[in-house]
Amino acid sequence: MKNTVDHFLDITGLVCPMTFVRTKLAAERLPQGQILEVRLNYGEPLQNVPASLREHGYEVSEVQPENPADLTGPHRIFIRRN
C-alpha cells in the first residue's frame, strides 16, 4: 500500500485492550479509501491490533518495524477503510 497516509495515530503509550479500541475508533472515522498509519509497540499490540482490524473488515498491510535493525521496537501498520 504505497499511497499517501491520510491520518496518523500513535498508540505506543496505551495497553490492550485500549490499543485496539483507539485504533478501531480512528479507523471508523476514515472515509472510504483513506489510509490510517498507526504506530504501535511490539508484542501484544502488534499481534492483536492488526488481526482484530482484519476481523472487522479493514485492510491492513505494510506492517513495518520503525528500525529494521530492532524488530522488538515500535512498528507501523497501515489501515485502509474499504
Image (spheres, rainbow, N blue to C red):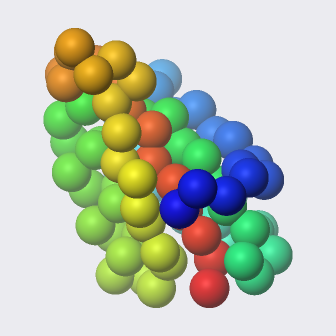
> For the point 47% across and 75% down, which residue is it?
59
> For the point 40% across and 53% down, which residue is it?
62
Q: On the image, which quarter does residue 8 sit in?
A: top right
Rendered location of residue 52, percent (x, y): 33, 69
Give above or below for 69 relative to 46. above
Q: Nearer the viewer, residue 15 or 71?
A: 71
> For the point 33% across and 30% down, which residue is it?
65
Q: How many marks?
A: 0
Q: On the image, which quarter does residue 19 sit in?
A: top left
Q: On the image, which quarter does residue 56 sit in?
A: bottom left
Rendered location of residue 80, percent (x, y): 60, 70
Rendered location of residue 66, percent (x, y): 40, 24
Q: Would residue 8 be seen by someone viewing this image from the given angle?
A: yes
Which residue in the rendered view is the most extreme toward the front? 2
81 on left or right of 54 = right
Rendered location of residue 73, percent (x, y): 28, 19
Give above or below for 45 relative to 48. above
Q: Quadrant of the C terminus?
A: bottom right
Q: Would residue 16 be seen by someone viewing this image from the given angle?
A: no
20 on left or right of 80 = left
> For the point 67% across and 58% down, which residue is it?
3
Q: Nearer the viewer, residue 4 or 24?
A: 4
